[in-house]
Amino acid sequence: MNYRIGTKQDIPAMCRIRKQQLIDEGLSPENNIDKELSRFFEKKMADGSLVEWLLEENGKIIATAAILFVEFPPTYTNQAGIKGYITNMYTDPDYRGKGIASAMLHKLTDEAKKRGVRHILLHASNHGKPVYERFGFTKTDRFMELNLDP
């Protein structure tokens, strides 16, 4: 198995895996989001605000994990205002339960530490929550969502 950081050439595979992740989390693929996903990955990878790790076996990507660096207003405890947001955590079902997600989390948190980022957020699926809790993440109620109808 080979861990590596994704490149522009990996964007089609990253889009495919992201869509599969959304479906596995119970979202219905009602719209085609290929263009939007491609643009997102291209932009965020180009400006350095997204680092996506891939795990390959025999040339096939079997797991992904990304950290998106987001700028918030500075606070007394986070003067730079930068927080990491973990996203695109996905492991092929045939490879789950083998410590891959934990290994990926180490890579993402190492990337955050290299950049001096100490605050990391994520939204956990029911499947992923135990992995994140074992890693040390705790549930907070500080964030809320507002969905506006179009």
Image (tube, rainbow, N blue to C red):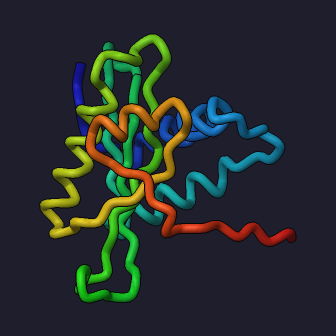
Place of residue 6 in the rendered image (x, y in percent of width and height, measured from the top left): 34, 43
If the image is split into quadrants, where does the N terminus sit?
top left
* Nearer the observer, 90 or 46: 90
User: Does the rendering let one see residue 75?
Assistant: yes
Q: Position of residue 90 (x, y in %)?
A: 46, 33
Name the foreground residue: 120 vs 37: 120
Residue 2 higher or lower than 48, as above or below: above
Quarter of the image containing the C terminus? bottom right
- Please provide percent x and percent y for residue 29: 77, 39
Q: Tell me the residue at 76%/46% (across/down).
A: 32
Residue 44: x, y in percent?
43, 64
25 over 8 or under it: above or below: above
Q: Is residue 45 visible?
A: no
Residue in view at x 66 percent, y 47 percent: 34
Q: Residue at x 21, y 43 (%)?
A: 107
- Snapshot quadrant of residue 100: top left
Q: Quadrant of residue 85?
A: bottom left
Q: Quadrant of residue 82?
A: bottom left
Residue situated furthest right in the rendering? 150
User: Does 131 sit left or right of 17 as displayed?
Assistant: left
For residue 146, side relative to residue 141 (left or right): right
